[in-house]
Structures are given as C-alpha cells and as structure tokens.
Image (cartoon, grey):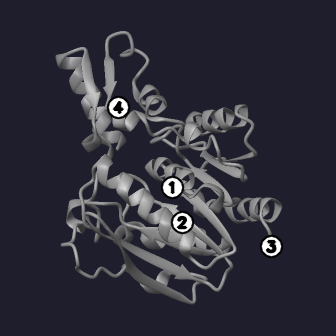
Amino acid sequence: MKSSICTILVSTLLTSCATTITQSTVFQPQADNRRAPGSTLEIEREDDLRSSNALVHGRITTSFGTIATSHAKTGSNRLIVACMGNAGDRKTDGIGYLNGLVPYGDALVFDYPGYGDSAGSPSLQDFEITIDAIAEHAAKADYDELVVWGHSLGGFVCGEIAKALGSAADAMIFETTASNVDAVTDAWLPWYAKPFVRLRIDEGLRSYDNVAAMADFHGPIAVLGATKDRQLPVKLSRELAEGLTATGKAVTYIEFEGARHMNVSTHADYAARMTSFFEAQLTP
C-alpha cells in the first residue's frame, strides 16, 4: 500500500497540487494468487503450522459469493479472528499469521473479497458485506472467548468486525496499524511536500476510524507498535493507543524495539509479552 501511495505523491509533486486516495490505492490483492470463485485453495507449507491439531478450510456464503477461510484448531476455548494486511492472503501469508496466533487460541484467517480464493471485488461495498459475514460466523462459533486481531490494513477491517460483534467480542488487538486513513497519509507525505500537496481521501475510506469503531467496545484492547516499521511508522501505533485511552478504553500499549511492520510475531519479546496480556486481561 505504501509504495503505491508514495508513487502517487511523487507524481503529484511533478504534475499538480492535488490527488485522491481511492479504494484501488488501498486494496491491493496479489494478482498471481487470485483464483476463480468456487476453486479450492490449500494454504502452502501446511506442515509448517505450529501448535495446531487441525487446519480446516471452509467457505462463508455472502451475497457476492463465498469468502474463503482457514481455521487452525488447537483445542482452545478461545477463537482469534485475524485480519491480514492490504496484500495478504491465505496462500502467501496464512501460515505466518496463524503461527503468531495459535499459541493463544484457535485462529481464523480469511481472504478478503477479490483476494486469493474469495469471490467478490476489492471494494468498500464487498468489504462491508464481508465484515458482517465474518462477524456473524464468529459469533455463532462455539467458543467461550472471542478475540479480534487486525494487522496493518486489517486493523481497520477487524476494528469494524469488533464493532459488528458488539458484546460478543472479548478483546481487540491492533497490530502496527493507525487511527484512520488521514493519519496514515499525513505520516507518509514528506514534510517538504505538505505546503504544496492536497490529498483528497475517498469518503468511504475516511469512514474507517479505529477510535470511532471502538466507541461502544468495553473489553481490553492491545495496541502493538514496531519501532523500525517503515510502512506505518510507530508514531501511528502510539497515537492510536493515546486516542483510545483518551476515550476511556482499557488499553495496553506494547512496543517492540527493533521490530518491523511484518515481523512483530517473531520478535524475541513477543511470546512473553502477549502471554502476559492474555493472562492479565482474559480468563485462563
């Protein structure tokens, strides 16, 4: 996502004083992983999944077709619903995401609409349908605890899923993400360009706001920041934690020194600090 927006900003500096951040700027499925709706896609390197007794692939029916899912089952009474980054899909990134989650419960990942093995298009309309479908699916699952965990772009998607779940969600985790799209674009625009460039943001994208999404959420929230994050600078995670705290939410901010945007779950302190969060904030 950052590379595309940076290209737009450079072009803007050379040609005009205004540009628009659109849905296609943000939603970027990997074209070579796109499969025809109804096909079967198995996550590659399935044997690399740790701490799981079973990995079950499934589909959730929506008005635009099916959403492809992969559910790692460990025998836990806790389900973690995970939302991947803007180019993430089950084939390319599924195992990496699941390995960071299964130490803390069963985990569910899914391909966004128009991504991987899911039908639909990478549009706000189909994302909204997907958010409701995933929330309904998770609420019906037979678990004592439900945690929603969003990384990068997935922070905004999972924030909306937690909002849709309401009291059914027990905890929310935001990993290397931001408060809203305005904060992201402001962080990416070089200081020397700000006096000359006007960024217009698609109003649908502007509606994605993690602080606003958590307005009626009453469970514990963790915000994970990475000090070497070059895609979404760590100040965005800090600002998100501060914004949520200012609204009276129970926020635990966890910063990983030297971690980058995509490798928080492999950081040396990750297991101990996440275990501490789950033990302190949720039931055993």
**Gap in Å between the C-alphas at discs 3 and 4?**
42 Å
Q: Which residue bears the numbered disc 4?
A: 203
Disc number placed over residue 81 in the picture, else none: 2
Image quadrant where residue 99 sits? bottom right
N-terminal label among 4 and 2: 2
- On residue 284, the disc is 3
Q: CA distance from mark 3 to mark 2?
A: 18 Å
Residue 257: percent from left, percent from top: 66, 47
**Nearest to viewer (mark 2 / mark 1):** 1
Mark 1 and mark 4: span between their CA atoms? 19 Å
Disc 1 crowd, CA 10 A, few/some/many (<14, 14-19, 20+)? many
Q: Going 60% across and 42% down the picture, which residue do you hit? A: 227
Does residue 65 lie above or below 122 as drawn? below
Give me the C-alpha separation between circle 4 and circle 2: 27 Å
**Location of the N terminus (image quadrant):** top left
Give yes or no for contact between labels 1 and 4 (Cβ–Cβ under 8 Å).
no
Does the rendering let one see residue 45?
Answer: no
CA gap between label 3 and label 1 equals 24 Å
Label 3 secondary element: loop
Secondary structure type for disc 2: strand
